[in-house]
């Protein structure tokens, strides 16, 4: 895990709140963990505002959530999500020291307005500038399986401008979507 000084230096250089920079850092490593997972990597397609920022427009607004279209609707299951995100959390911790405590993860599976199953999840984290007491900051997940992919998903590298970025970079599966 990078140190608090790196977060503070980037925050000063970009005129951003250190907690915003820390969340961007954690989002990058959460994506790395998701796309390192053999069950998620081939079928989770990254989309939305954070995808625009992390994959296409580095200076685009900072975002707080990770949105995915799942090509396998069976992944929209609380038990499955708890299991794979325990794996993702362990992978992220082993590679960075970032904590994504499994007891502070929540997956709310529901029927969306289109009549299909969706999930909103929350992943808490403890990073370099996170408070040492009180509630932990969180990343929101928005998972759907009923959106049409306009083009076949492709591997896309993300922007992760931190000193502990993997030498080989971090890649996600991304595509263009068409909303209903």
Image: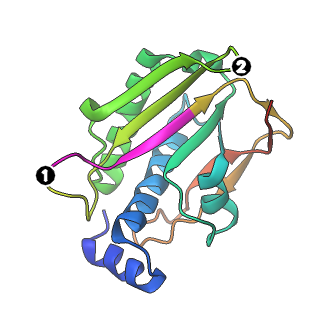
The crowding category of the residue bearing disc 2, from other C-alpha atoms within 10 Å (few below 14, some 14 to 19, many at least 20), is few
- The extreme front residue here reads 113
Residue 27, placed above or below residue 16: above
Q: Residue at x 80, y 29 (%)?
A: 180
- The extreme right residue here reads 150
> Does residue 26 appear left or right of residue 145 in this picture?
left
Residue 70, placed above or below residue 22: above
Question: Mark 2 = which residue?
Answer: 114
Query: Which residues lie in the magenta part?
Result: 133-142
Q: Residue at x 50, y 71 (%)?
A: 161
> Does residue 30 appear left or right of residue 46 in this picture?
left
Question: Is residue 140 one of those drawn in magenta?
Answer: yes
Residue 66, placed above or below residue 10: above
> Does residue 70 appear left or right of residue 107 in this picture?
right
Residue 65 on image: x %, y %: 51, 47
Name the residue nearer the viewer: 134 or 141: 134
User: Picture quarter containing residue 18?
Assistant: bottom left
Which is closer to the viewer, label 1 or label 2?
A: 2
Q: Residue at x 41, y 64 (%)?
A: 20
Question: Mark 1 = which residue?
Answer: 133
State the colouring used for the structure image.
rainbow
Question: Is residue 166 one of those drawn in magenta?
Answer: no
């Amino acid at each position: 895990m990078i140190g608090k000084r790196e977060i503070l230096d980037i925050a000063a250089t970009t005129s951003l709140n250190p907690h915003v920079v820390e969340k961007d850092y954690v989002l990058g490593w959460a994506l790395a963990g998701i796309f390192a997972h053999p069950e998620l990597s081939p079928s989770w397609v990254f989309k939305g505002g954070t995808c625009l920022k992390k994959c296409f427009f580095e200076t685009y607004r900072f975002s707080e959530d990770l949105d995915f279209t799942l090509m396998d609707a069976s992944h929209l299951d609380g038990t499955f999500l708890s299991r794979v995100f325990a794996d993702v959390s362990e992978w992220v911790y082993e590679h960075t020291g970032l904590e994504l405590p499994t007891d502070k993860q929540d997956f709310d599976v529901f029927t969306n307005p289109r009549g299909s199953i969706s999930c909103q999840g929350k992943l808490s984290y403890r990073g370099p500038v996170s408070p040492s007491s009180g509630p932990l900051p969180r990343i929101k997940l928005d998972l759907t399986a009923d959106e049409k992919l306009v083009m076949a998903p492709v591997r896309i590298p993300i922007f992760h401008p931190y000193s502990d970025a993997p030498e080989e970079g971090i890649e996600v599966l991304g595509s263009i979507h068409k909303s209903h």
